Image (spheres, helix red, strand yellow):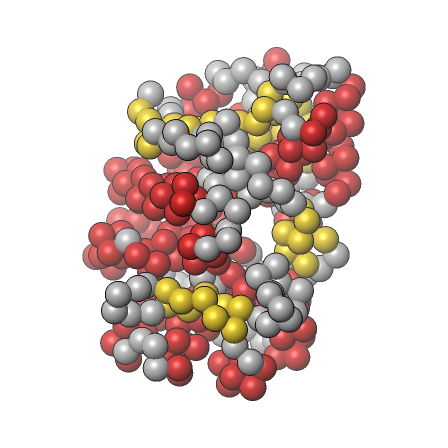
């Protein structure tokens, strides 16, 4: 078992473990949470103490949390019990959220099975559910005790789901991992073919990058907000399409294209930097043109968690001594970016 990074800080006491499929499937837990796509990875003994939810973002609701908590009560679990989430970002977010609520907090470990969850959702301690048409509106900061990362799961992902995770990988590269950025540019075909050595290396890059940021700023009061690059735009697109027409990764990829455009229109990045980042997104095949109502998008952005003092704040790429900036954009400028 290889430790990706020993994390020994008080506010985020997680261990990130690179494991094999056999090691993760043998993990012991008191309550397992999975969905229709991942339930097959559970043993018969694990299924007897599991909550199996329908797959998809539409299930990221209080009703699902209530099912998890009700099962914990039925199993007579206590504060020392262990919740284990086996699945993608939705399952990881909800399992940790339920664990943070049960008896005011019980132990939780996560086994992400999608690339998106491995490189982003399972790492960092953010939990939550959607509320109405608004993404991740209600939740907690509650880091898992351990995150078991098994790259073997990536082999079974549908192409669209794999690309969903790659969008978060591209985000990490743009934010400051130049070696990862070069890997994405020079080894695109091998990455799309899911070369196991490159996939492992890519996951390690992302986990180490995010762990370093979270170690510095668990509760997103500073530098951690940079990890939302493309997300204010992307979450709004997901919201107005009912969390079904556009995947999270597609939304983030489109959102990054708008963030890059906003930075270029402001003069914060060069034309060459703009073209490099847009080319990266298009070369990986992300659609960057959607039919939408600008008014609906701006309205959805008004419910974003990053609003402060009534101002919509956006993460934009930058050049020079820093790789990003966080600043408000007024509606007139937003319309110019979106139209």
At horizontal 71% and vertical 17% (from top left) the residue drawn is 77
Q: Nearer the viewer, residue 94 or 49?
A: 94
Q: Specify the quadrant of the image occupied by residue 75.
A: top right
At horizontal 33% and vertical 60% (from top left) the residue drawn is 174
Q: Nearer the viewer, residue 16 or 63?
A: 16
**Residue 112 showing in the rendered view:** no
Q: Nearer the viewer, residue 197 or 268?
A: 268
State the count of labels: 0
| Residue 319 percent across, percent down from the top left | 28, 70
| Residue 165 percent across, percent down from the top left | 44, 49
At horizontal 25% and vertical 69% (from top left) the residue drawn is 320
Q: Nearer the viewer, residue 320 or 53?
A: 320
Q: Is 158 placed left or right of 50 in the picture?
A: left
Q: Is residue 172 above or below residue 203?
A: below
Q: Is residue 278 above or below residue 210?
A: below
Q: Specify the quadrant of the image occupied by residue 256.
A: bottom left
| Residue 229 percent across, percent down from the top left | 45, 61
Q: Is 136 placed left or right of 234 in the picture?
A: right
Specify the quadrant that holds the N terminus.
top left
| Residue 249 percent across, percent down from the top left | 49, 56
Q: Is residue 83 above or below residue 179?
A: above
At horizontal 67% and vertical 19% (from top left) the residue drawn is 79
Q: Is 252 placed left or right of 3 in the picture?
A: right
**Residue 28 showing in the rendered view:** yes
Q: Residue furthest top?
A: 45
């Amino acid at each position: 078992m290889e430790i990706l990074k020993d994390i020994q800080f008080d506010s985020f006491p997680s261990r990130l473990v690179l494991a094999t499929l056999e090691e993760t499937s043998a993990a012991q837990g008191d309550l397992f949470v999975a969905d229709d796509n991942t339930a097959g990875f559970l043993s018969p003994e694990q299924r007897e103490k599991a909550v199996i939810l329908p797959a998809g973002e539409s299930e990221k609701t209080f009703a699902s949390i209530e099912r998890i908590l009700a099962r914990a009560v039925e199993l007579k679990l206590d504060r020392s019990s262990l919740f284990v989430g086996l699945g993608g970002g939705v399952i990881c977010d909800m399992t940790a959220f339920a664990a943070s609520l049960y008896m005011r907090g019980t132990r939780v470990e996560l086994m992400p099975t999608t690339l998106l969850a491995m490189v982003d959702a399972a790492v960092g301690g953010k939990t939550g559910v959607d509320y109405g048409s608004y993404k991740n509106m209600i939740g907690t900061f509650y880091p898992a005790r351990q995150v078991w990362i098994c790259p073997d799961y990536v082999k079974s992902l549908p192409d669209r789901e794999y690309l969903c995770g790659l969008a978060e990988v591209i985000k990490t590269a743009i934010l400051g991992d130049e070696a990862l950025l070069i890997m994405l540019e020079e080894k695109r075909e091998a990455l799309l073919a899911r070369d196991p050595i490159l996939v492992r290396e890519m996951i390690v890059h992302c986990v180490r990058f995010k762990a370093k940021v979270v170690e510095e700023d668990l509760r997103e009061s500073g530098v951690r907000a940079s990890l939302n690059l493309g997300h204010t735009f992307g979450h709004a697109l997901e919201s107005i399409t009912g969390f079904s027409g556009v995947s999270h990764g597609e939304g983030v990829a489109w959102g990054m294209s708008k963030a890059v455009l906003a930075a270029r229109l402001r003069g914060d990045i060069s034309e060459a930097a703009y073209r490099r980042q847009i080319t990266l997104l298009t070369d990986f095949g992300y659609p960057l043109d959607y039919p939408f109502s600008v008014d609906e998008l701006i309205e959805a952005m008004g419910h974003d968690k990053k609003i402060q003092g009534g101002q919509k704040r956006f993460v934009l790429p930058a050049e020079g001594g820093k790789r990003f900036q966080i600043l408000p954009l007024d509606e007139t400028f937003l319309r110019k970016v979106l139209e």
